[in-house]
Amino acid sequence: MTGTRVRVRFAPSPTGDLHVGGARSALFTWLFARHHGGDFILRIEDTDRRRYVEGSVEGIVESLKWLGLEWDEGPIFQSQRLEIYREHAERLVAQGDAYPCYCTPERLEQVRAEQRARGEPPGYDRRCRNLTPAERAEFEAQGITPVIRFKMPEAGTTVVPDLLRGNITFENRLLEDAVILKSDGFPTYHLAAMVDDHLMGITHVTRGEEWLPSAPLHVRIIQAFGWELPTFVHLPVILRPDGKGKLSKRDGAVGVLEYQRAGYLPEAVINYLALLGWSYGDQEIFTREELIQLFDLKEINPSPARFSFDKLAWMNQYYINHIISLEDLTVRCIPYLREAGLVPAAAEDPTTPEHVYVREVVALLKDRLKTLAEVVELTSFFFTEGTEEYPADLLVPRKTEPASVLEGLDRTREILAGADFEDEAGMEAALRALADELGLKAGQLFMPIRVAATGRTVSPGLFETLRVLGKERTLARLDVARDKLRAYVAEQSSAAG
RNA sequence: GCCCCCAUAGUCUAGAGGCCUAGGACGCCACCCUUUCAAGGUGGAGAUCGCGGGUUCGAAUCCCGCUGGGGGUACCA
């Protein structure tokens, strides 16, 4: 297969949102294609009408686009290729490699039940494998639409070559005659995927490890057609954080689009997913280009890995704090702030004062943001006239007298009224001196100011916050705080007295 | 039950016979920085390399068995 152009595909079935496991398969496949300058094809395996979920194709497409995994061909829908699969199934029947089966679901279920009762491995008993033409005609006369089953050899072994695990040998006698064409005329995965992979010139079949048990069937089907085997790469499954089974929707945020909504960066998600089963020495942070250059399917660790929400969250924060630029972060935060109604549309234009202001705010949050969505909660007070409502006692730190806090705020207002708000160091020096004079620790003075200015006890650095807030709003908020505190002190003393 | 895959700290992993007194990262703990929260810095706890046999002068690395975990066992993918 050396010398041929690499062609790979991502082939999800439209049964729901694209989840992180599927996204990782797509990523590995895409990286391999890009590394080799090959083709990445998107194929939709919609051959089960019962499990089809409306809108999931759109979701898959949106997810892949968001992650930046662009495809070169497709999406190709298997449901539009039914004729192709039917012809191939008929060809196998004509060659004697497949046969129509008229057994009812009820009979199959009964057979399985009996096998289980006898402790035998369940499987089709091949009753229709050797029907006489007369028997076949009889079933046809009854109007039964048959399924087509593939004839597995009854003895010997089938070897599946897997890129990550080497040759895997299966006993043919333990394999059954699987259905390849259903009675509704749709193919099963086994037929459709093999036919498409061949017709589309797929060189490397990347798919989840859950396909390993049916791989010998696939090998036999391909051989029955006389086609060349592709390179099989069975990617390890992703396990739940507790390791108990495959990761699934029940385990929390698992859909790719959920991460988009929660304010994760696609590059962080990509980086995290790449590290789940693949590594490059001690390096952990990779640009997309580095990933393309360094990635190799052969180096994938075949053991299943658990999904860690914690590490993904860390990765996202790391990208926000250290990788992307301030302007980039600003641009990405604006949609969240817009949606919350905190900033005007003008902020989207980088030449406007509104945009510049958002950037100043975001600059203060760059080291604190874990997700983009958090920007709303963490910065809302920068975009409103006053602060949100807060209880008066929030202004009084532990082990501090309300009266001295009130005095501190009064004096602070006087000092700040005459201060240059662009001079953070100057404001800090003046207020530190004030704290000294009042016999307070810096924190005992700074916390009330913080609460007055922001309405909360957690915020960016105090003086940069004041600078961005500006004198007018700061003084107004200090006035509100002083009134609130005076009322509180009065209430306390009357209660005490 | 049967078949298949996998097996280094709580988690993701480095390691392809001697470089390993097993390296990195997340998480955890402590200290430093410090006006809160983060970020950052320094240090720490945490792995008899699942267990038992081999092979070898020498094994986390090779072989076998066991155990554990995972996957499959559909007219689902």
Image: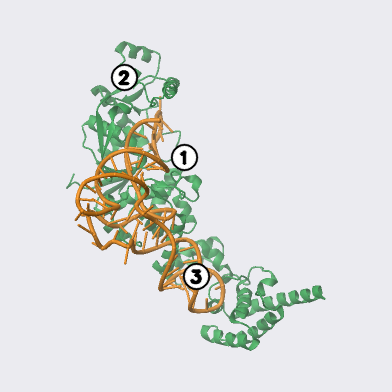
Chain colours: A green, B orange
For the residues marked 3 and 1, what is the alpha-carbon distance in whole angstroms? 40 Å
Residue at 37% x, 14% y: name it: A139
> According to the image, label 1 marks what residue?
A53
> According to the image, label 2 marks what residue?
A129
Quick check: can you spot residue A170?
A: yes
The answer as to whether the residues below labels 3 and 2 share one chain is: yes
Which secondary structure lies at badge 1? loop
Q: Position of residue B22 (x, y in %)?
A: 33, 61
Quick check: can you spot residue A71?
A: no
Which is in the foreground here, disc 3 or disc 2? 2
**Location of the N terminus of chain A (image quadrant):** top left
For the residues marked 3 and 2, what is the alpha-carbon distance in whole angstroms? 69 Å
Q: Residues within 10 Å of mark 1 (few under 14, many from 20)?
A: some
Which is in the foreground here, disc 3 or disc 1? 3
- Tag 2 or tag 1, which sits nearer the N-term? 1
Residue type, label 3: Leu
Mark 1 belongs to chain = A
> According to the image, label 3 marks what residue?
A365
- Tag 2 or tag 3, which sits nearer the N-term? 2
